[in-house]
Amino acid sequence: MGDLMATPLLFPTTLSSHATSLFLILHLCLYVCLSPADIISTVEFNHTGELLATGDKGGRVVIFQREPESKSEPFSQGEYNVYSTFQSHEPEFDYLKSLEIEEKINKIRWLPQQNAAQFLLSTNDKTIKLWKVSERDKRPEGYNLKDEEGRIKDISTVTSLQVPVLMPMDLMVEVSPRRVFANAHTYHVNSISVNSDYMTYMSADDLRINLWHLDITDRSFNIVDIKPVNMEDLTEVITAAEFHPHHCNLFVYSSSKGTLRLCDMREAALCDKHSKLFEEPEDPSARSFFSEIISSVSDVKFSHSGRYLLTRDYLTAKVWDLNMESKPLETYQVHDYLRSKLCSLYENDCIFDKFECAWNGSDSVIMTGAYNNFFRMFDRNTKRDVTLEASRESSKPRAVLKPRRVCAAGGKRRKDDISVDSLDFTKKILHTAWHPNENIIAIAATNNLYIFQDKLNSEMH
């Protein structure tokens, strides 16, 4: 990610009394990226939360590692420092189609750790790659046929045999490509998801979903194909897809029409006929020119339990129960104050922004991004919510993140309230990730990475 500057900032105070402890967020680290190609395009914790990977528009992947607890520095537990940086994808050009293929990393997904090495999948618009991340702190010395610089010796000079030994060396992190999965997508890949069997994964583009075996690169199985015979009959596209966390036969995909389709691979090889369709009936009185655009689902995530689905459209986040298809179980207004701004948001293309969403480890709180570097959290149990800001200007050393409030145009303003007319729509938080077990979150704010931690969580260390 180019030159990275890590600035640890610790905030020992609390938020205002109306926020729950889940929203007592500390600003731990800010990593500043210094070039336009460093705009972060995806963020993902591994299954233990000890590693955090980010991908950027320059095709690079940066891995951060959580530091071990230090007795001399009680707040050091939770800080993430740069572990490894590597170039995942390069820009390409398809000469047959006269099409430029960007190097931008669309998604990163970690595989569960099964040995000393870590493995992750990364994808741009067309090609998915499997990477191995390993450590080396010893090197062999005392070869019989090679000298210390690795050159082959003259065999006639070898008069005795010796046993090579492993000598300690400075820790080296090695990242190597293990598989390249290419030439299977006509359209841009928007999702990859690792199956719970840990042997297969799927990749989705606008019209198709493919199933891959992690050991086979030269073929995949098409499990969803919504491409019509006549492209003029096309009415919707696939926007996101994910496997169920526990049942390897189930997966869900979302569409630009705001629908979710749960599919069972046991029913048929081609899952064009879904098992369940989750769709909220439209209110005819609320229909407008923008209704179809803002209802498009930009992200879908299974809860850790596998019982619920979390979706994000332009204005709302919704929680769906797998046993209730007719309507969402819960609906949360992310930035309803933008309804009056939809016309201008359409003109500047912001209405097509794709916001992601995330669950906390216990599925009790959800998180998603907004404009002006704001991100929103909703407690499903207490129904409380909070708006926080990931901003270098508003984050001072040893000061807690204060809840922010946006008031609609013409509404009554309290002190520190922000008018909807003064929001900066160029500052947007599209990519977020939540630690699988702890209240630690990663926020990508354009070309800056913020890591925040619950104050109660940090005081335990």
Image (spheres, rainbow, N blue to C red):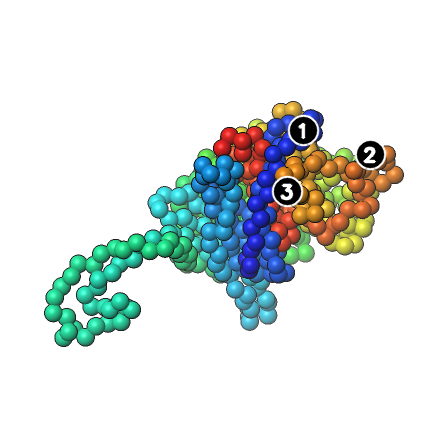
Q: Position of residue 287 (x, y in %)?
A: 79, 40
190 to the left or right of 175: right
Identify the amino acid type marked 1.
Answer: Ala
Q: Position of residue 5 (x, y in %)?
A: 57, 54
13 to the left or right of 422: left
Q: Position of residue 275 (x, y in %)?
A: 54, 36
> Looking at this view, is 89 or 19 the one in front?
19
Q: Which of the two labelled residues, at mark 3 and mark 1, occupies the earlier sequence position?
A: 1
Which image quadrant is residue 15 in? Answer: top right
Which image quadrant is residue 124 in? Answer: bottom right
Circle 2 SS class? loop
Picture disc at residue 397: 3
Q: CA distance from mark 3 to mark 2?
A: 26 Å
Can you name the residue that lies furthest to the front here? 72
Q: CA distance from mark 3 to mark 1?
A: 21 Å
Picture disc at residue 414: 2
Q: Residue at x 15, y 61 (%)?
A: 162
Q: Which residue is mark 1?
A: 19
Identify the amino acid type marked 2.
Answer: Arg
Residue 393 appears in view: yes
Q: Residue at x 78, y 42 (%)?
A: 338
> Looking at this view, is 411 or 459 the one in front?
459
Residue 227 appears in view: no
Measured along the vertical axis of the image, is residue 181 above or below residue 399? Answer: below
Picture disc at residue 112: none
Crowd band around label 3 with a 10 angstrom C-alpha radius: few (<14), some (14–19), many (20+): some
